[in-house]
Amino acid sequence: MVTLEELKAVFKPKLKPIIWREDSLDLLDQSALPFQTTYITVKTPEEVAKAIKLMQVRGAPAIGITAGYGMVLALISTKPNTLNEAIEELVKAKQIMDQARPTAVNLSWATSRMLNFAKKKIEEGEAKSVSELIQLMKEEANRIYEEELEAELKIGMYGLEKISDGDTILTQCNAGGLATGTGLGTALAPVKLAHYLGMKVSVIAPETRPWLQGSRLTVYELMAEGIQVTLITDTAVGLVIYKNMVNSVMVGADRILKDGHVFNKIGTFKEAVISHELGIPFYALAPSSSFDLKSKVDEIKIEERDPNEVRTIRGIPIVPENVKVYNPVFDVTPPKYITALITEKGVIYPPFEKNIPKIIGL
């Protein structure tokens, strides 16, 4: 079996969605893809929150990395005079950013980690000034990025065990390097690593209405890497699985509960049910930071977005004006439809309520 160090040597991302500049953050504007490859620069928590809300940066891990750097920007932009003032600014920044995308657990996970890190370094006396605290927090934000990349490589290693040469994988939305900020991804990590290792592997990508992350982002990303990809409409998923055109389904996850319920991009539930009925393995791939072992399924808020995202495509109306719209961004997949969860800590099989805490260790 290939080792982690060998994978690190093999993997060279062609896309860089997040670039840290020491006092600012450059984000690949995913709302402009695939026709424009442009970066936006953010320097404050408010600008970070806006970029997250407008989905210029999207995908749970990428949002987490961005929010980690956003906490650093909170201190750089406000220039607090004392450590007490610094903590106050960090608390404000956390509140601002946490509201941008409430369903993605990585967001609040990252801001909480950064806030707790700052408090700990002050209490331990390691940060004696605001400037020292900023430097330490830069290093911690970088660690979040590096940990995410290593986690994705490990996810890719475990996922490779579920892929054979010649396989076709069905996915949903975009759970590649654009969604994670590293250039690798979660659900696409095994696919990319298989490709880099010389295996013949291909992907079928549903378009993922209304933001079209499948057609705009997944297709763009895989074509950039030279991986064969076929685009389908969201409504073609059932037929594609029925006709044995895929060997397995691999999706990401914005939140996974202790009992195995998976919150992911709308359309995931449908893929899981059809796969279950037709005997196709269904895997959700996510880092341990996406696990929520405290919440119950009915406690999770399903984010709803602007109805005009459904009424229009890139601002062009496609339905009668002011038609009533229900636009949930995520759905929830019950554990009975999930073959396994693939994380950087291993593959988790049912019963999930017993095995998730055992493997994740949270």
Image (cartoon, rainbow, N blue to C red):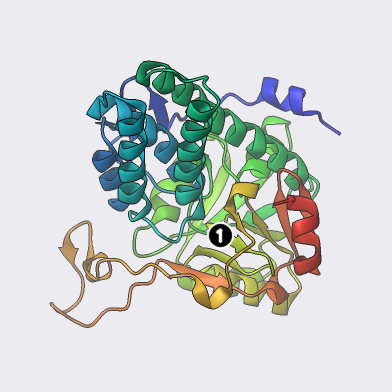
Residue named by callout 1: 255
Image quarter of residue 269: bottom right
Left or right of residue 10: residue 104: left
Q: Is 225 located above or below residue 289 in the figure? A: above
Q: Residue furthest left?
A: 321
* Residue 4 in sight from this viewpoint: yes
Q: Is 58 located above or below residue 73 in the figure? A: below
State the residue at coordinates (26%, 30%): 43
State the residue at coordinates (74%, 38%): 199
Q: Which of 253 and 157 is in front in this view?
A: 253
Q: Residue furthest bottom?
A: 324
Q: Nearer the viewer, residue 62 or 247?
A: 62
Q: Is mark 1 on a helix, strand or loop?
A: strand
Quadrant where the image shows the N terminus: top right
**Image coordinates for residue 5, horizontal then vertical, percent:** 75, 23
Q: Nearer the viewer, residue 281 or 20?
A: 20
Image quarter of residue 170: bottom right
**Image coordinates for residue 194, horizontal then vertical, percent:** 71, 38
**Image coordinates for residue 239, horizontal then vertical, percent:** 58, 74
Please name the amino acid that badge 1 sits on. Answer: Arg
* Residue 178 in sight from this viewpoint: no
Left or right of residue 45: residue 234: right
Q: Is 39 located above or below residue 320 in the figure? A: above
Classed neighbour count for the residue bearing mark 1: other residues with Cα under 10 Å, few (<14), some (14–19), many (≥20): many
Q: Is 42 located above or below residue 232 in the figure? A: above
